[in-house]
Amino acid sequence: MLLAHDNRKIYFDLAGPQGAPTVCFTHSLNADGGMWVEQMVPLLGAGYRVLRLDMRGHGGSSPVEGDYTMDALAADVKGALDVLGIAKVHYVGLSIGGMIGQGFALANPDRLLSLTLCDTQPSTPPGSTGAWDERKAVVRKAGTLAALADSTMERWFTDEFKQVNATRWREVRDTISNTTPAGFLGCASAIQNFNYEDRLPTIKVPTLVICGDEDAGTPPDRNQLIASKIPGGRYEGIAKARHLPNVERPEQFNRLLMGWLGVNR
């Protein structure tokens, strides 16, 4: 489904009973709302309403040319919630989705029931500017994200995952390849220029931080830092998982998420 915001279209999927507590998902760079498929059955079974949003230039959402900021991406989430008439949500974001979640929590604390941040960063990763510039140059030259698909999958999943779930592995890889260059380039620029670290102690909403133990791109120590800075923040690691533990280890991830939402429902 599409909604209009700021003269462009944002794609969303909304399922579950109206009036139920809403869980709002934001996804990783070069992904879309489909990366949360493994979470849908337990959430709907427990009576939650589930909203999955696609970022600018990702999935079914319109691309926007130029550099993005994390605060602008967080404002997109608020705009979508306003159009849909959803007052408060349990927010769950992974990777850049978790970065957006921090920005959303800082700007809109009254819109949150709880916050779950997964495999993310509290600020631009130290020493990462060159690597991001290289990836951006590859995409500009190729004109497609397919050029980054294989290297991205290596960072996202262990070798075991491809062997045991080849179909899902291909689905995720195809989503990377189909991301628009404008969406990738804009979001990559946002990742290269943000810092919420010093403001995290002002977040008062109940916060859970989850990270795959083998995630090299958004490593456990950076996620632990987020949890340590937010008052009452809780950290949980997931063994034998890299960047997308919700896809690679859904049983462990869902157990943590459902328990957390239950406590804060």
Image: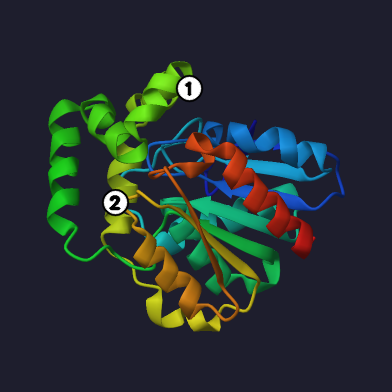
Residue 66 in sight: no
Name which residue type carries label 2. Ala
Q: What's the distance in space between the residues labelled 1 and 2, CA to CA?
A: 21 Å
Q: What is the quadrant of residue 222 in the picture?
A: bottom left
Label of residue 168 in the image: 1
Q: What is the quadrant of residue 206 in the picture?
A: bottom right
Whether residues under marks 1 and 2 lie with C-beta atoms below 8 angstroms apart, the answer is no
Reading the image, the residue beneath label 2 is 216
Tally the numbered discs.
Answer: 2
Left or right: residue 163 compared with residue 53: left
Residue 111 in sight: yes
Q: Quarter holding the N terminus? A: top right
The secondary structure type at the circle numbered 1 is helix
Left or right: residue 157 compared with residue 89: left
How far across and how far down the image is residue 186, in percent?
Answer: 31, 48
Residue occupying image coordinates x 34% and y 55%: 218
- Whether 127 is drawn above or below 201: the answer is above
Residue occupying image coordinates x 81% and y 37%: 45
Q: Earlier in the sequence, mark 1 or mark 2?
A: 1
Label of residue 83 in the image: none
As drawn, the residue found furthest toward the top would be: 167
How far across and how far down the image is residue 86, in percent?
Answer: 75, 54
Instruction: Answer few, some or many: residues within 10 Å of disc 1's Cα (few below 14, many 20 plus, some between 14 and 19).
Output: some
Instruction: Answer few, some or many: residues within 10 Å of disc 2's Cα (few below 14, many 20 plus, some between 14 and 19).
Output: few
Name which residue type carries label 1. Arg
Residue occupying image coordinates x 34% and y 32%: 180
Q: Quarter holding the C terminus? A: bottom right
How far across and how far down the image is residue 130, in percent?
Answer: 12, 54
Left or right: residue 172 compared with residue 250: left
